[in-house]
């Protein structure tokens, strides 16, 4: 490995690790704020209707922001890991005579980030005392989605009780129907529509697409 290649390799690793450190810091802030808002909502739910509405809206927006943050982290984490794997594969290929990117075997002793040791032997999916190849980032995204769902239910319930109390005769049926309706609208908005909002998208126009994935178009 030349000095230039080593510098590039270390830069990729540093960038990936830096983004991971930033994400863990942001996640801590998000969950502290979400927890505080949840406690605050039930503290002021009965005493101040206006304040409870403000807390509900803030809780929903912060939980959606947390969901978007986790979703964005997974994208960038996958991006840097692909770069690391491709860079290691190229380095191995360059160090072998007559090697090509398509045919070169990746020797375990020459790669670090593009290999795993005993992937399937160490995977104990049903054993509660051992680990398994579960994506912690996907679990974090699932938890973030559940939090969005929870705030959506709270807002949906509050709106529904107001509507039912004013104009519905069949109170139980209307209440359940409206809760489901408003919850679904808020959840879909937060987890499916908000990620497509241009305001939250990274500007990729000035970056070159290396097209490392076979299905990338």
Image: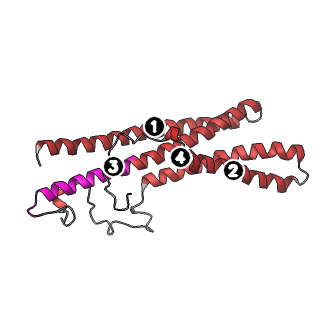
Q: Nearer the viewer, residue 92 or 208?
A: 208
Check disc 2: other Cα within 10 Å, few if <14, some if 14-19, many if 20+: many
- Mark 1 to mark 4: distance in Å? 21 Å
Q: Which residue is mark 4?
A: 196
- Mark 2 to mark 1: distance in Å? 26 Å
Q: Where's residue 61, x and y in %?
A: 60, 38
Q: Nearer the viewer, residue 214 or 156?
A: 214
- Mark 3 to mark 4: distance in Å? 20 Å
Residues at badges 1 and 4 in contact (C-beta under 8 Å)? no
Image quarter of the C terminus? bottom left
- Mark 3 to mark 2: distance in Å? 38 Å
Tell me the mark number nearer the camera, choosing from 3 and 2: 3
Of pointers 3 and 2, the one earlier in the residue sequence: 2
* Residue occupying the far left of the picture: 97
Tell me the mark number nearer the camera, choosing from 3 and 4: 3
Tell me the mark number nearer the camera, choosing from 1 and 3: 3
Disc assigned to residue 209:
3
Of pointers 2 and 4, the one earlier in the residue sequence: 2
Q: Where's residue 58, x and y in %?
A: 63, 35
Q: Which residue is mark 2?
A: 183
Q: Quadrant of residue 60?
A: top right
Span shown in magenta? 76-98
What is the secondary structure assignment of the residue under circle 1?
Answer: helix
Q: Is residue 130 magenta?
A: no
Q: Residue at x 37, y 66 (%)?
A: 123
Q: Quadrant of residue 5?
A: top left
Check disc 3: other Cα within 10 Å, few if <14, some if 14-19, many if 20+: few
Q: Main secondary structure of the magenta part?
A: helix
Q: Which residue is mark 1?
A: 26
């Amino acid at each position: 490995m030349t000095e230039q290649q080593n510098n590039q390799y270390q830069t990729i690793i540093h960038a990936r690790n830096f983004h991971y450190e930033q994400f863990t810091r942001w996640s801590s802030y998000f969950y502290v704020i979400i927890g505080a808002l949840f406690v605050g909502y039930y503290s002021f739910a009965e005493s101040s209707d206006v304040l409870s509405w403000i807390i509900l809206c803030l809780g929903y927006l912060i939980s959606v922001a947390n969901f978007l943050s986790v979703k964005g982290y997974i994208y960038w984490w996958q991006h840097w890991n692909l770069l690391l794997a491709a860079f290691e594969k190229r380095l191995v290929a360059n160090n072998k005579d007559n090697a090509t990117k398509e045919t070169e075997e990746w020797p375990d002793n020459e790669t670090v980030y593009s290999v795993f040791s005993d992937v399937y032997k160490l995977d104990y999916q049903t054993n509660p005392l051992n680990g398994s190849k579960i994506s912690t980032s996907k679990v974090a995204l699932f938890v973030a989605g559940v939090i969005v769902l929870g705030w959506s239910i709270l807002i949906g319930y509050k709106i529904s009780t107001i509507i039912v109390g004013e104009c519905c005769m069949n109170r139980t049926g209307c209440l359940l129907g409206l809760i489901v309706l408003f919850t679904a609208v808020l959840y879909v908005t937060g987890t499916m529509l908000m990620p497509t909002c241009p305001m939250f998208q990274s500007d990729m126009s000035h970056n070159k697409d290396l097209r490392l994935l076979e299905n990338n178009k």
